[in-house]
Amino acid sequence: DTGVSQDPRHKITKRGQNVTFRCDPISEHNRLYWYRQTLGQGPEFLTYFQNEAQLEKSRLLSDRFSAERPKGSFSTLEIQRTEQGDSAMYLCASSLQGDGGYTFGSGTRLTVV
Amino acid sequence: TQLLEQSPQFLSIQEGENLTVYCNSSSVFSSLQWYRQEPGEGPVLLVTVVTGGEVKKLKRLTFQFGDARKDSSLHITAAQPGDTGLYLCAGGGSNYKLTFGKGTLLTVNP
């Protein structure tokens, strides 16, 4: 297992375009998380899946954001009608239930121009 | 809302020096984790502490969880340039979510 993989690593998009990011967690991990990190800040929670069920979404996740985890494997995070304020590093992490430690991916750096 | 304050925000030291960074909150956490993050990469878990007063050592790094489980410290002995990075603390509650501090950006100069 090579850890948590995120794709793409970098994405530059024009304001108003839609973007989709993918995360492949560690295969035996049933929990998957999306966080967002802006410069000078720690990661902020966006949403959480246990298996295929999305159990919580942060208020940071406006209706332009949607996340899925079909079949409880990989996950996608889509942002519609991107805005400059969406520019950030989007981090995916996974963990085993009952194990507090997260394994993070390398992130997707989004720049909205 | 649970908040974690980390101090100092920035720290620049010479190779071989010792340092301590702090993570404080007014809230009680069931666990406290420390991560190290390099530029352009995701955070990497260093340690998880769960018991008040717990001390864990990882080579030259010593982590302590406060007795009341509201604060933690990370002490690095004889810092090396490879220790350079953003050190993040994260508190875990009764659920699955972690609350992160803003981090301490450490630079160790050769």
Image (tube, rainbow, N blue to C red):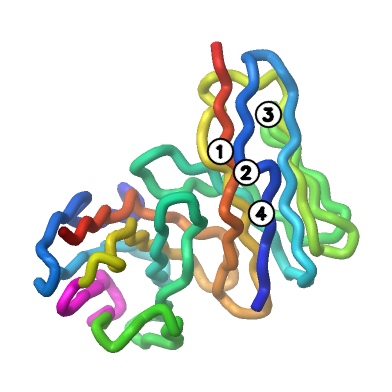
Crowd rating for badge 1 (residues with CA inside 10 Å; few <14, some 14–19, many 20+): many
Viewer-side label of 4, 1: 1
Mark-to-mark CA distance, 3 and 2: 24 Å
| A45 to the left or right of B90 | left
Q: Mark 1 sits on what residue?
A: B105
Q: Quadrant of residue B109?
A: top right
Crowd rating for badge 3 (residues with CA inside 10 Å; few <14, some 14–19, many 20+): few
- The answer as to whether the residues below labels 2 and 4 share one chain is yes
Q: Earlier in the sequence, mark 4 or mark 3?
A: 4
Q: Mark 2 sits on what residue?
A: B9
Circles 4, 1 touching at the beta carbon (< 8 Å): no
Query: Residue type at mark 1?
Result: Leu
Residue B57 versus residue A80 in the image, above or below: above
| B1 to the left or right of A45 | right
What range of the chain is rendered magenta? A67-82
Assign a secondary structure to mark 3: loop
**Residue A21: percent from left, percent from top:** 20, 65
Query: Residue type at mark 3?
Result: Lys
Q: Earlier in the sequence, mark 4 or mark 1?
A: 4
Mark-to-mark CA distance, 4 and 3: 15 Å
Q: Earlier in the sequence, mark 3 or mark 2?
A: 2
Q: Mark 3 sits on what residue?
A: B59
Query: Residue type at mark 2?
Result: Gln
Circles 2, 1 touching at the beta carbon (< 8 Å): yes
Q: Earlier in the sequence, mark 2 or mark 1?
A: 2
Crowd rating for badge 2 (residues with CA inside 10 Å; few <14, some 14–19, many 20+): some
Is A71 part of what is drawn in magenta?
Answer: yes
Residue visible at 51% across and 23% down in the picture: B82
Mark-to-mark CA distance, 2 and 1: 6 Å
